[in-house]
Image: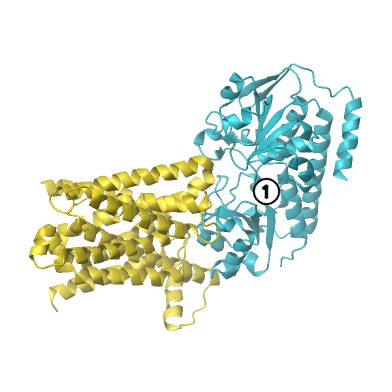
Amino acid sequence: MKCMILAVASLLGAVSASAQTHYPLQIENCGRKVRFEAAPERAVTIGQSATEILYSLGLADRVKGTSVWFNKVLPRYAEVNAQIPRLADNDPSFESVVARKPDLVAVQYEWHVGPNGVVGTREQFADLGINTYILPADCDTKDNSTGGDGTRVGAFDPVQVYKGIRQLAEIFDVADRGETLVDDLQATEARAVARAKALDLPKGLKAAFWFSSADIALDPYMAGQLGAPGYMMRALGLTNVVQSDEEWPTVGWESIAKADPDVLVIAKMDRRRFPADDVEEKLKFLRSDPVTRQMKAVREGHIVVMDAHAMSATLRTIYGLDSLSDALAGMTFQ
Amino acid sequence: MSRKALLWGAGLIVLALTLLAGAAIGETRLPLASVARVLANHLWQAGYPVDRIDAGIIWSYRLPRAIVAASCGAGLALTGVVLQALLRNPLADPYLMGLSAGASTGAVLVSIAGFGAGALSMSAGALIGALAAFAAVVALAHAIPGTARGTSGAAAIILAGIAGSQMFNALTAFIIARSANAEQARGIMFWLMGNLSGVRWEDVLPAVVVTCLGALVCLWHRHALDAFTFGAESAASLGINVPKTRGILITATAVMIGVLVSKVGAIGFVGLVVPHAMRFLVGTRHQRLVPASALAGAVFLVLADIVSRIIVPGQVLPIGVVTALIGAPAFALILMRGAR
């Protein structure tokens, strides 16, 4: 259905002249001016979010390489994705990106391509005549100079995702497809929020998001206030039991158990770096640990499994919001 | 009552109070009455009504954590005592001898490079890595000519430790540089700096048993340890079977370190500082030094763990950060007082 809407929309887009991009196009992107003389023909993506946005804009034929995968690609793009070279599951090397001869490198995280980018700096790419575009969700409310994942200085808002979609659509001269995609996501968002509102959830319902842990019983990586999960909780009227502003702080089980969340969201991912990456291991721990099994969320089975990629600031965040709202609808709170 | 018994009694009371503090103080604030009730419920089936989560936190998280911290502190201090005597080097300490470097290499091999994926946990990787590094360093030290006798041996072990540490650190850096992200780097920190958050009751028995056995081995060889302080040759001249005794003591040390590292990661400075502090207090005779170091190490690590949990609100610091922050200035103080 969605594909059809997109296809129809792109046809409409083709006939509508008003949304055409006028080149040269100059946009401000993560503190840097980027100039496009024409729509890119060959894009390489660093980050699953950038990849899936381009696919969602119907631009898969322009994607000449992908990298940094958290989950399986959205099912509707499985076929098209299989045709595109995956440069690396994690960080690609600078040369492997350059070797694809891209005219645009679309990036999810500034720590991959940015002032201290592990793949390269934007200057390095610019020197070879390659444009770079970083998704605003990773820099608009974030200070990436702090090293590692960076630190959010303001709360994530889907507006940042929409901005990224619209800008990429403009860069590729498919502005109408971008609008359609944003409309679609906004509708999903509104529906999810309305559904949760209709549930008339008890005030102050507490929730927590568990991403993974370095070892199964060690302090877990939990979602802080300002990242995508923080937005989901706020949007649906849940209170995050984790106070930290960091994106994924380590928080002791003692603190989480003491806060006793009513709902626990756990991440599902394909990678197996730590035992706790496995949803089954997470559930086993929660149900067998003498303390966590006493938590309300565990006793009452209020555990929601969500794609890890939805817990990052991506277009999947909206799908995560939707699935969380859906899961809440199936729960009863006294 | 003799003075010795009095001191022992006092020491054990301090340890018991420290363990109680470990059960009472943590990330979250729980009323002392709850702590008392939970302990009474478990120890004497007192049947007080208590919140189930509070009870779980005190009994299932904090108490085993405190006991394992005490075991680790005692074990690490003992390994410091043994290594310093055997190697006749005041700087000998498992941490400096490549242990933490090896543990982190083992942990990254499992978690990032995917060695033995599934079959091995990160802690098992850390254990194997620590023992491998330790063995490599000891072997290297022995391979350096002239180690068996003379003063060059004292320096050899430290040089071997530096070489081993550097190599294993480079390996870790290599693996991380190849594929790790910030989250993985953070996971590795657990093994680099030590962390007790994953400790549960099932960890208590192995930690306590290995430490108690280690302490007994050390006490049994207290006179040999005294003799080794004057060199292997004097030990031999006193009728000690040097290779055998050395083998037993090194094995005991390695087993203790291996088990403890697999539980809590590599914690530095305890093995280095505590024996020095105790030598200062009770003298160099191992009859006193061994139990005193074990006791002091136990108390020190439980306290360090408490500090690591409460010093930054809402965040737990790796315990190695705390032991180094307290240990390094304390060590400097000891050095300065010793020099005077």
Q: Answer above or below: position of B45 versus A245.
A: below
Please identify the quarter of the rendering in which residue A312 is found: top right
Q: Nearer the viewer, residue B255 or A189?
A: B255
Q: Position of residue A262 (x, y in %)?
A: 65, 62
Q: Left or right: where does residue A182 sit relative to residue B26? A: right
x, y percent for residue A108: 64, 36
Q: Secondary structure at mark 1?
A: loop
- Which chain can be seen in cyan? A
Q: How many marks?
A: 1
Residue B42: x percent and y percent?
45, 79
- Chain bearing tag 1 is A
Quadrant where the N terminus of chain B sits is bottom left
Residue B143: where, in percent of width, then height? Answer: 24, 50
Position of B315 with respect to A164 (left or right) is: left
Quadrant for residue A220, please give it.
bottom right
B95 or B137: which is nearer to us?
Answer: B137
Q: Nearer the viewer, residue B314 or A62?
A: A62
Left or right: B184 in relation to A74: left
Residue position marked by numbered label 1 in the rendering = A71
Task: Tell me what residue is drawn at x 22 percent, y 58 percent.
Answer: B275
Query: Tell me, what colour scheme is on the image?
Result: by chain
Q: Which chain is yellow?
A: B
Crowd band around label 1 with a 10 angstrom C-alpha radius: few (<14), some (14–19), many (20+): some
Q: Is residue A41 above or below residue B244?
A: above
- Residue nearest the observer in this picture, A86 or A251: A86
Residue at (66% x, 57% y) in the render: A204
**Mark 1 is on which residue type?**
Asn
Question: Does the image show residue B311?
Answer: no
| Residue at position x 42%, y 83% in the image | B44
